[in-house]
Image (spheres, rainbow, N blue to C red):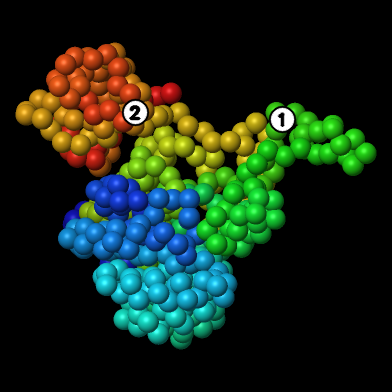
Amino acid sequence: MDGTNNSQLKHKKPELIAPAGDMDKLKTAIAYGADAVYAGGKEFNLRNAASNFTLDDIGLAADYVHKEDKKIYIALNIFAHNYHIPKIEQYLKELARYPVDALIISDPGILEIVKDILPEIPIHLSTQANCTNSKSANFWYKQGVKRIVLARELSLNEISEISTHSDCKTEVFVHGAMCLSYSGRCYLSAYMAGRGANLGDCAQSCRWKYSLVEEERPNEYFPVFEDGEFTSVMSSRDLCMIQHIPELISVGVDAWKIEGRMKSQYYVATVTRIYREAIDTFFGNGVYGYQDKWLEELGKISNRGYNTGFFLGNPGENGQRVGEESGYTQDYKFVGLFDRPKEKKFAEVIVKNKFEVGDDIEVMGKRPEQDFVQNIKEMYNQEMEPIEKANPGQRVFIIPERPVEKYFMMRKRM
């Protein structure tokens, strides 16, 4: 080999975009290799249950990511009603003080407001807008959209055609939760729980447990599948494309997005670092090879089972989790976040879940080669008094067997 990877010459390197539900998750995403993050304000985005950012928080976040030479995109992707319009106009006037890198919108009315009030800020089209063809992509480009987050119901071939035959840059989700409804256009939550999914308040009614009731036997409940404890007939498996990196890169998409603004720091760190390594491996020197450890690592976060969504064709029955498997799978628990060293041998840990002396702990670094396993032989509180157990919310000191850095994490098999 001459040290040059042909992949570098043929393909563009996609931007890796990670979710930032709050400032801690934002910093974690950047530490673990994201090129950009996407976040939401306190209103007008589709993840109201996330902590989200005040306007001042957005300013601090923008300063932070720009110092790291990264980018921040702000979601403004609800389908607005008339009563939202004055509030959105005021919000954008206040947001103008902060140097965000793009706004993510889905509503044509909001697009017009953004172009009027913040004409210099790039506009990205949300997957919620359901762009599924190159004609539609070019339409949005003519309206001023710079990048389109394509609908999740597209195959790799369709994505390739759009990327090739449209002037707009393209972005796709590559990992995370999938929606039963067409790119999020769901009214089930509003009907069953009074919470509008298209306004950011989805109750995830599709994932509830359901039984069949015969109208003349109102107190008799029958499972939809007789051999299962229960079924969530509309609970989609999670998307995971880690085994198909070359195929994803070959279709020419400009950016890859990880779903999960409501998920934990541990989720953000784990998923971001694996896709970061996969991308860098593809574009590094030498011949690319898929590594089994990548999928193994992604199996250590809470998930509903993985599939490839619509990328390789309609998933059909393989897209759903039914019967006893309908819930989450989680084999590891996030127990601690390294904060700062104390003197030379001690490291401070912010405790996320209970652990104790004698536990075997996996330390997760920002890159997989930094991982190691150790037994907790001793532990100290803030007064440097020896303790046996650490509880959530505490700060404790341990002696790591290898070097650790701020944002390294600790996990334990459940």
Q: Is residue 2 left or right of residue 170?
A: left
Specify the amino acid type for callout 1. Gly
Q: What residue is shown with label 2?
A: 392
Is label 1 in a helix, a strand or a loop? loop
Q: Eyeballing the image, is 414 above or below 337?
A: above
Residue for point 14% across, 20% down? 384
On the image, the x and y values in percent for residue 248 come to 43, 59
Q: CA separation, marks 2 and 1?
A: 35 Å
Which dot marks residue 228?
Answer: 1
On the image, the x and y values in percent for residue 314 come to 63, 56
Q: Eyeballing the image, is 86 above or below 362?
A: below
The one nearer the camera, 344 or 245, is 344
Q: Residue furthest right?
A: 216
Quarter of the rendering occupied by the C terminus? top left
Residue 122: image quadrant is bottom left
The one nearer the camera, 211 or 391, is 391
Q: Is residue 62 left or right of residue 84?
A: left
Residue 214: image quadrant is top right
The one nearer the camera, 12 or 211, is 211
On the image, the x and y values in percent for residue 239 come to 51, 49
Is label 2 in a helix, a strand or a loop? loop
Specify the amino acid type for callout 2. Pro
Q: Is residue 149 in view from this perspective? A: no
Q: Are marks 2 and 1 in contact (CB under 8 Å)?
A: no
